[in-house]
Image (tube, grey):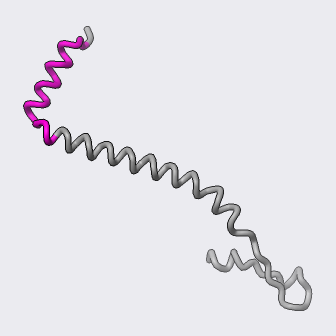
Amino acid sequence: MGFSTTHLIIFLVIIIVIFGTKKLRNIGSDLGGAVKGFKDGMKDGTADKPAESAAAPVQQVTTGGTAAKETIDVEAKSKA
């Protein structure tokens, strides 16, 4: 008890009559743009991760005296 090809054609004709071809074309265009934007966003998201980890090495600044006591993590201060 599934849908046959005839059922699907009748369903599509009813949808076209209700919405019209222009509105269906606009819906298709909007949906295609949304999918393209999503794919671009996913591509940008995966491309940025390796670049971020390699671009910012940890910098340590020392000011005279004992290095163990006066080592300052510059990156930790900027995050806070």
Quadrant of residue 53 in the image? bottom right
Image side of residue 66 versus residue 59, left or right = right
Residue found at the far right of this picture: 66
Residue found at the far top of this picture: 1
Image position, residue 9 (x, y; %): 17, 19
Image side of residue 17 versus residue 79, left or right = left
Please tell me which residue is depicted at 14% across the width and 19% down the height of the picture.
10
Image position, residue 11 (x, y; %): 16, 22
Question: Is residue 5 depicted above or below 24 in this figure?
Answer: above
Please tell me which residue is depicted at 72% across the width and 79% down the height of the picture.
74
Question: Is residue 48 depicted above or below 36 in this figure?
Answer: below
Question: Is residue 14 depicted above or below 46 in this figure?
Answer: above
Image position, residue 64 (x, y; %): 88, 91
Image quadrant where one finds the N terminus: top left
Q: Is residue 17 magenta?
A: yes
Give the main secondary structure, helix, strand or loop, of the magenta stretch. helix
Image side of residue 42 versus residue 67, left or right = left
Q: Depth check: 8 or 1 in front?
A: 8
Q: Give the range drawn in magenta.
A: 3-23
Image quadrant where one finds the C terminus: bottom right
Q: Is residue 51 magenta?
A: no
Q: Depth check: 41 or 3 in front?
A: 41
Image side of residue 15 versus residue 73, left or right = left
**Figure label count:** 0
Please tell me which residue is depicted at 53% across the width and 54% down the height of the picture.
45
Please tell me which residue is depicted at 64% across the width and 62% down the height of the picture.
52
Residue found at the far bottom of this picture: 64
Question: Is residue 51 depicted above or below 38 in this figure?
Answer: below
